[in-house]
Amino acid sequence: MIYRANIRPAWVVLVLLLCFALAFTLAKTTDSSPGDKTEKQENIIKIDLTKFKNSENNEHCLKCHGQSKYTYENDETKKMVNKRMYSELIINRNEFYVSNHKGFKCTDCHSEDYAAFPHAGNLRMESKPNCLDCHGGDEKYAKFQFEKIDTNFMASVHSQKHSQDFTCWMCHNPHTYKIKARTNENLKETITYDNLICLNCHSDITKYELLTDKRKPNLLDKHDWLPNQASHFTNVRCIECHTQNKDTLIVAHQIVPKNLAVKKCESCHAKNSILYASLYKYQVQENISRKGWVKGLILSETATIGPDQDNTLNIISIVIFTFTIAAILIHAFLRIRNSK
């Protein structure tokens, strides 16, 4: 009599293990589904103005500055006139009401005389407040260290070369700026957000030429020495290489001259690199506090860098997987041998 080995249970176990490995790999992506992102976007678009205490006052301004055209009555002709709003004077409502300054009145920073229309021509000459005018010396904002940031900024190449012409608002739009982007769960969004601040001028000749007569630099040509440019541009912030790193500050503000920019690979691709002191500084701690120890460590989005990276988890996973496959094969072999 011939017995045929029944090895189906072994294959079932193998398939289940492969499914488990695939599910584990995709665990991070399943934490935030596309549906969640769509819901968040809809929440931003559908703004409930009653939640903002100064929205009534601000809407008085945004009825003109919140759209591409505005309408007014000409006092002389008594006719309604439609005009296009200058693009640089348009404030995006959706971005403003999720920004850090969403609770302020427009006239907290701009003159009360703007309440009258048409606006007096001399109002455009008024000086704009800077960060320290509101945040300096205030214990409520002490943790952000605005005074130290200002000291670093004053020593930066931007301030040294352009003096009073270069203000906080050259990089941080007061109507849309939101510090929460730096602690966003998605690190790629943080990198993109911060890099766009630099590219706002360095990739836009209309803004770049306001401060210099030099030709707009071609960023790709200027970084032709950098290997794998695309990967660096999308995974590292400009400030990691172009600032004097200050470990005590949330974000370094002392932009250094181009000849002092980081160009050595080992500065980033080594243990205790500048990236671990800045970009990835709080990533693991935040994951642990939000997801717990096990999930925070295993599913951390923090990238391990360079030859000194710790591959302990990878090695353990490979060993376990190898022993599991070996056990299945041995089990199948013994069943076949015993069935003869």
Image (spheres, rainbow, N blue to C red):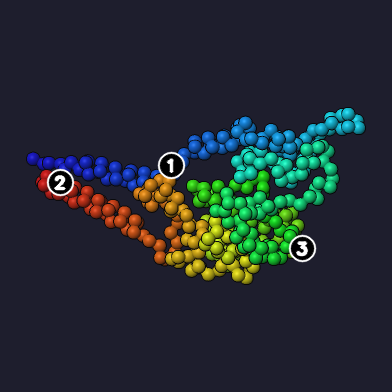
Q: Is residue 209 above or below residue 267?
A: above
Sequence-first disc among 2 and 3: 3
Which image quadrant for residue 241?
A: bottom right
- Depth check: give the residue in front, 249 or 267: 249
Tell me if residue 172 can be seen.
Answer: no
Q: Looking at the image, which residue is at 50% across and 64% down?
A: 274
Residue type at numbered disc 3:
Asp
- How many neighbours does mark 2 have within 10 angstroms: few (below 14), some (14-19), or many (20 or more)? some
What's the CA distance linking mark 2 and mark 3? 81 Å
Disc number for residue 192: none
Sequence-first disc among 2 and 1: 1
Q: Secondary structure at mark 2?
A: helix
Residue 129 x %, y %: 71, 51
- How many neighbours does mark 3 have within 10 angstroms: few (below 14), some (14-19), or many (20 or more)? few
Residue type at numbered disc 2:
Arg
Q: Is residue 259 above or below residue 25?
A: below
Q: Looking at the image, which residue is at 73% across and 51% down?
A: 128
Disc number for residue 213: 3
Which residue position holds label 2?
Answer: 335
Task: State which mark lies toward you, 2 or 1.
Answer: 1
Count of numbered badges drawn on the protein: 3
- Give the left or right position of residue 237, taking residue 276 as reference: right
Q: Secondary structure at mark 1?
A: helix
Q: Looking at the image, which residue is at 77% across and 35% down?
A: 70
Which residue position holds label 1?
Answer: 31
Residue 304 x %, y %: 43, 59
